[in-house]
Image (tube, grey):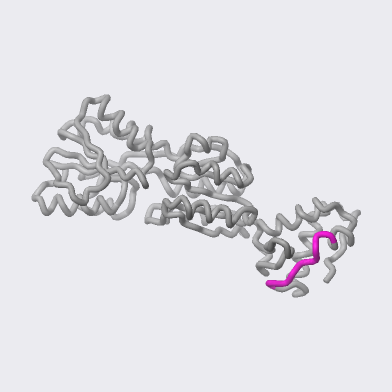
Amino acid sequence: MTLAPIEKKLGIPKYKQIINAVIEAIVEKKLNKGDKLPSISKIQKENKVSRDTVLTALNELKTRGIVQSIAGKGYYVLSEDVGTEKKVFLLFDELNSFKEDLYSNFLEGLDENTQVDIYFHHFNPAVFTKLIYENIGNYSSYVIMPANLKNTVDIIEKLPQDKVYILDQLHEDLHAYAAIYQNFEKDILSNLTNSLSKIQKYSSLVLIFNPKVQPEGMKKGFEMFCNQYQMDYDIVPTAEDRELLPGEIYIIPDDKNLIRVVKKIKEQGLVLSQNIGIISYNETLLKEIVEGGITTISTDFKAMGKRLAQMINKNEHLQIENRNQLILRNSL
């Protein structure tokens, strides 16, 4: 088939006219899902344009999810939904209740005609690498949550820098990228310091810290606090086999260990906020209610999602530290 010809005096860039010609062919059913587009050389010769002009048009159609390229074969219609103007690759580490808040507010804040495809790497470096490599060139924006995976810059640098947004953890080697992040070291240090008078009623602090999942900054900030105020402390990977002792405060980043500690408190006959304390991470509705309320250190995930959407809508390339607070409840 032949695409609608370019009009030189129309005042619209040539590559955009090629885009419009492909979309018009799909709308008019001259091209259907799975059909092959005319070759680059054919479009180039028929319209007397450069190869780069044709490639610019096809790459934009590709990032919008309308066409796909197959190596050695050419370009094919991938979707007949031509209304999509932006296509976002969203890579989370895992899904939980507070990240659902982030995700829903992100979707709500995006401009119309923006498609979001969500993926999960589950802290697996091989999955992280595979998902990014398989989607190079397929999206107009890439939102990536690297978690605590090492050397992610080696993978992320394969993407266009101006299309990448780092979320939640901003490693030192990723400081060239736009980001909305948490400062875990500063946040735990400042929030524990602000609640010092309550913490000093206890004899020791215990951080439940899984190095495969939790950010290193959290551990550093915790150790800084304990050393600064000369408090006894311990760092353990899980509460599963631990006997709780009166006078301990448990700082718990994940909800599975939070449930374990609450259950052990009851089994051992301890009394929350009297002879044992809990500080949990990441605010959820349930933590307002459980055991009269669980104290949390939490970033505002709803605000994170909304601000991320604004950055993508406006094509902003900023680094924003998301706000964080201590919500004091019965458990401390």
Q: Quadrant of residue 218?
A: top left
Answer whether residue 37 is magenta in the image.
yes
Question: Is residue 292 visible to us here?
Answer: no
Image quadrant containing the N terminus: bottom right
Residue 313: give x, y in percent of width and height.
60, 49
Nearest the viewer among 155 and 101 is: 155
Nearest the viewer among 158 and 299 is: 158
Determine the residue positioned at 58% across, 57% down: 134
Image quadrant containing the C terminus: top left
Nearest the viewer among 272 and 168 is: 168
In this view, 52 is above or below 273: below
Q: Say left or right for 262 vs 24.
A: left
Answer whether residue 117 is magenta in the image.
no
Question: Is residue 34 visible to us here?
Answer: yes
Residue 178: give x, y in percent of width and height.
56, 40
Q: What residue span does the magenta drawing correspond to?
A: 33-41
Q: What kind of secondary structure does the magenta stretch mostly adopt?
A: loop
Residue 257: give x, y in percent of width and height.
25, 51
